[in-house]
Amino acid sequence: MIVQIYTAQSADEAVALAALGVDHVGLTPTSVGLPGQITEAVAAEAVDALRGRARSVALSVEVDVDEIARMAQAVRPDILHLCGEIGAVGPEDVRRLRTLLPAGMEIMQAIAVGADGDLAMARAYAEVADYLILDSYTTDVQGVGAAGVTHDWSRSAEIVASVSVPVILAGGLSADNVAEAIAVVRPWGVDSLTRTNRPLGGGRFEKDLDAVSAFVRGAAGVPTL
Ligand SMILES: O=C(O)c1ccccc1NCC(=O)[C@H](O)[C@H](O)COP(=O)(O)O
């Protein structure tokens, strides 16, 4: 079971997450005002520090393909995570984006579970992306994700069974519910942001390494099919 944790706030924190057994370390290089945002320079430093330790994932909520490609070229993550507003970057845009990325960079597409046409969108994006991330949606945060709440896992299970790319489940996951989520959805991986954070006040946070460690153990405790 792959464990992905968003979002490291520094290169040192990214390395600490990898040392706990996190497989994918998420980074949020932007200045648009997202909960986990860091600068592109810090994200690029974290990507370098993670080489040989864990895979790096960097997200974008942008809708302009050329701007997304510019960020990807600057940060150079192993995986580019597309989580802009629902449908704003369509499957054909993702196809074009791939031609603009550094060789070998993979693409993970977010699907807002519960949105109109979620299953059809998942099938269409599965044709052009390397991974899907099934996430919760809130209008409080730009893009798809960082909602801090779970969604209808039976719908996610249906999507997992309908596509042939690896799927990560996200949305309100913590050590308390990850085993149940895996048992219901049977994803390839699981992701956590809000419920593995330690708030520092003023909207800032650091990762709670004890909570991350418990999450890694909780995910590992479920036998894979
Ligand atoms: O990191 C962010 O600030 C962010 C903002 C907008 C969309 C996604 C974002 N983070 C990446 C993720 O995919 C989260 O890890 C995922 O949505 C789970 O979040 P949570 O429900 O808070 O565990």
Image (cartoon, rainbow, N blue to C red):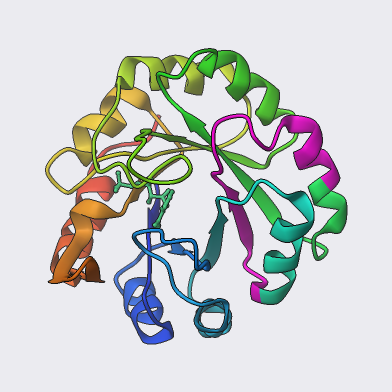
Q: Residue at x 30, y 41 (%)?
A: 147
Q: Is residue 202 above or below residue 189?
A: below
Find the magenta span and give its range.
75-96
Q: Quadrant of the C terminus?
A: top left
From the viewer's perspective, tell me whether residue 29 is left or right of residue 97.
Answer: left
The picture places residue 23, in percent across and down from the top left corner, at 44, 61
The picture places residue 64, in percent across and down from the top left corner, at 72, 49
Q: Residue at x 45, y 62 (%)?
A: 26
Q: Is residue 223 above or below residue 53?
A: above
Q: As rendered, which of 69 and 157 lies closer to the eye?
A: 69
Q: As rendered, which of 107 and 187 lies closer to the eye?
A: 107
Magenta stretch: residue 24 in it?
no
Q: Is residue 60 above or below residue 138?
A: below
Magenta stretch: residue 88 in it?
yes
The picture places residue 53, in percent across and down from the top left corner, at 48, 76
Q: As rendered, which of 179 and 7 lies closer to the eye?
A: 7
Residue 9 seen in this snapshot: yes
The picture places residue 198, in percent across and down from the top left corner, at 15, 67
Residue 52 seen in this snapshot: no
The image quarter in which residue 148 lies: top left
The image quarter in which residue 13 lies: bottom left
